[in-house]
């Protein structure tokens, strides 16, 4: 048989070859045109990890920004990354081109919390879970929680009062955990709450420890506690299914969800997202509340103004004999601005991580596929261009709404915090009862910051609380 190229092979093959060459060239083109951002990569393998941890990490970022500008490369914790310190860059990564940057966490952390938790995901599954979580934390849903949150706040404050030294951060963690439980389960039997709390605290200790399965290590203990959490959750979910109640809390939303094929979520998917939300809700809110107590304590005039605002509310509730209402929590402008300014100046989530899923070009610079990308929220929040005299605690700066993407304590875009309304609500409610009925003193004069892993005042802000006698 004669071997000739039939004409049709040429007709089909040749143009596709051309197209292939053209596409490859185009795919490669960012490499050719764009260069890597400025910056230094430090030592082989360890990169600049030591520089990052030998000082306050924020000093590291700020020094880099002064030297290189809004975008620079570095190499930390074995990852090559590009750091971004401008509102436009943050918007590019988190909002406009979010599909090019996926969330990225170490596998050891994913496995501990639960690999199906929404913040590890992108795309269809993420959108589905996010709708459910957002729905259960929306203003319409959480306005029904005001009374319950208030009860938790009052009982927490009562347990601190009496003049013994309290680790404010630890105390706030108990409070934000209870509020998290309310949003997730509604009313949950006390014995389940206790079991969850104890086992969860073991999981949490493993989260920032060395990931190894050697028995006796915090990470291994955490993995075992995580398994026990799954068992407890499975029991709770089983009981909820039997009752067939139509609650609007997170568990209710997760149980009722059907995808476009009518499939329900698996028990692991439900459990991972419950633990995930609890994790996202607890230390964040507790760190901010701790800072709020410090800032109010350090500024007696500001405290007076917040007190006056809150006392007016409590007087209209017959000296606090009536419960707070949702509407009242919407009318606390001074306290609200104290919360915003605390979020800005403490910037407890100082940056986040993403990973480029393709070569991406930004302002003429190449962000190579596989590199980590870190929007630096804290640098933006502390830039004098956007916040005049940024080191000064000044709630009145929020009389004017900040420019877009200059204030992102809750992130932005597809992964922005769905719990932000709940976080602000619980902070308002706790502050209301704190300033109207209690006084507090910070113990010791040591100032400084500890990373737990979010920044909190040194020692968790040891303080004494007293109930103020009625006037
Ligand atoms: C003051 C307290 C809080 C702060 C400062 C905060 C901050 C943030 C930030 C910055 C993100 C985005 C992270 C990123 O883009 O990588 C985030 C995500 C998230 N937060 Fe919060 N958060 C707080 C409280 C809460 C609370 C109370 C809940 C739930 C009850 C919550 C649930 C979540 C969840 C589930 C995500 C992941 C969303 C997603 O990936 O789609 N957060 N939070
Ligand atoms: C953890 O959960 C189990 C139930 O699976 C429970 O018996 C135990 O008391 C809980 N607490 C601790 C500290 O393990």
Image (cartoon, rainbow, N blue to C red):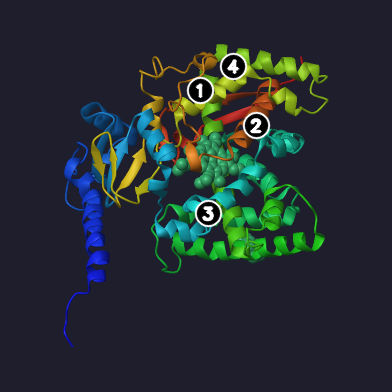
Q: What is the x, y in percent for residue 100? A: 38, 47
Q: Does residue 246 lie above or below 85 as drawn?
A: below
Which tag, 2 or 4, sits closer to the chain's start?
4
Report the disc number at residue 430: none
Q: Earlier in the sequence, mark 2 or mark 3?
A: 3
For disc 3, the marked residue is: 124
Label 1 close to label 2 by CB (< 8 Å): no
**The residue tagged with tag 3: helix, strand or loop?**
helix
The CA span between labels 4 and 1 is 14 Å
Percent position (x, y) of residue 146? 73, 34
Spatial distance from mark 2 to mark 4, Cα to Cα? 19 Å
In what quadrant of the picture does the N terminus appear? Answer: bottom left
Closest to the observer, 232 or 332: 332
Residue underneath mark 2: 425
- Residue 421: % across, % down: 62, 34
Q: Nearer the viewer, mark 1 or mark 3?
A: 3
Mark 1 beta carbon near ligand 1 (under 8 Å): no
> Which residue in the protein does label 4 denote?
303
Q: Earlier in the sequence, mark 1 or mark 2?
A: 1
What whole-number distance in Å separates the C-alpha atoms at marks 3 and 4?
46 Å
The reply to whether residue 191 is in sight is: yes
Name the foreground residue: 282 vs 10.
Answer: 10
Residue 127: percent from the left, percent from the top? Answer: 55, 49
Please report the residue visible at 40 percent of the width from the left and 14 percent of the height from the top: 388
212 over 288 or under it: above or below: below
User: Which residue position holds label 1?
Assistant: 341
- Residue 445 in view of the camera: no
């Amino acid at each position: 048989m004669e071997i000739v190229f039939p004409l049709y092979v040429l007709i089909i093959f040749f143009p596709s070859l051309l197209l292939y060459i053209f596409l490859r060239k185009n795919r490669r083109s960012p490499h050719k045109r764009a260069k890597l951002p400025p910056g230094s990569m430090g030592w082989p393998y360890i990169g600049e990890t030591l520089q990052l941890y030998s000082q306050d990490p924020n000093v590291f970022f700020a020094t880099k920004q002064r030297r290189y500008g809004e975008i620079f490369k570095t190499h930390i914790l074995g990852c090559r990354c590009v750091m971004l310190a401008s509102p436009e860059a943050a918007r590019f990564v988190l909002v406009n081109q979010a599909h090019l940057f996926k969330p990225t966490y170490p596998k050891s952390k994913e496995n501990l919390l639960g690999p199906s938790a929404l913040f590890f995901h992108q795309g269809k599954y993420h959108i589905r879970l996010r709708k459910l979580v957002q729905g259960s934390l929306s203003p319409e849903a959480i306005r029904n929680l005001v009374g319950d949150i208030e009860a938790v706040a009052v009982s927490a404050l009562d347990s601190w009062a009496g003049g013994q030294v309290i680790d404010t951060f630890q105390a706030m963690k108990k409070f934000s955990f209870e509020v998290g439980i309310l949003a997730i389960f509604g009313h949950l039997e006390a014995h389940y709450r206790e079991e969850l709390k104890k086992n969860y605290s073991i999981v949490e200790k493993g989260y920032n420890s060395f990931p190894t399965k050697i028995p006796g290590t915090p990470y291994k203990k955490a993995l075992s506690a995580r398994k026990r959490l799954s068992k407890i959750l499975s029991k709770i979910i089983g009981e909820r299914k039997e009752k067939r109640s139509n609650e609007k809390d997170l568990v209710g939303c997760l149980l009722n969800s059907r995808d476009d094929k009518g499939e329900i979520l698996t028990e692991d998917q439900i459990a991972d997202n419950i633990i995930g939300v609890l994790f996202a809700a607890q230390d964040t809110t507790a760190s901010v509340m701790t800072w709020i107590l410090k800032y109010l304590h350090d500024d007696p005039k500001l405290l007076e103004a917040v007190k006056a605002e809150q006392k007016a509310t409590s007087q209209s509730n017959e000296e606090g004999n009536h419960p707070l209402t949702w509407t009242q929590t919407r009318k606390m402008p001074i306290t609200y601005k104290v919360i915003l300014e605390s979020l800005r100046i403490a910037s407890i989530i100082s940056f986040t991580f993403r990973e480029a899923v393709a070569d991406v070009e930004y302002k003429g610079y190449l962000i190579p596929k596989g590199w980590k990308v870190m929007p630096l929220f804290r640098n933006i929040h502390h830039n004098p261009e956007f916040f005049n005299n940024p080191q000064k605690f000044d709630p009145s700066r929020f009389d004017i709404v900040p420019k877009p993407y200059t204030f992102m304590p809750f992130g932005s875009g597809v992964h922005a915090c769905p719990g932000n309304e709940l976080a602000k609500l619980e902070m308002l409610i706790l502050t209301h009862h704190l300033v109207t009925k209690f006084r507090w003193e910070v113990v010791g004069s040591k100032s400084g910051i500890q990373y737990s892993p979010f920044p909190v005042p040194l020692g968790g802000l040891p303080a004494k609380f007293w109930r103020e006698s009625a006037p």
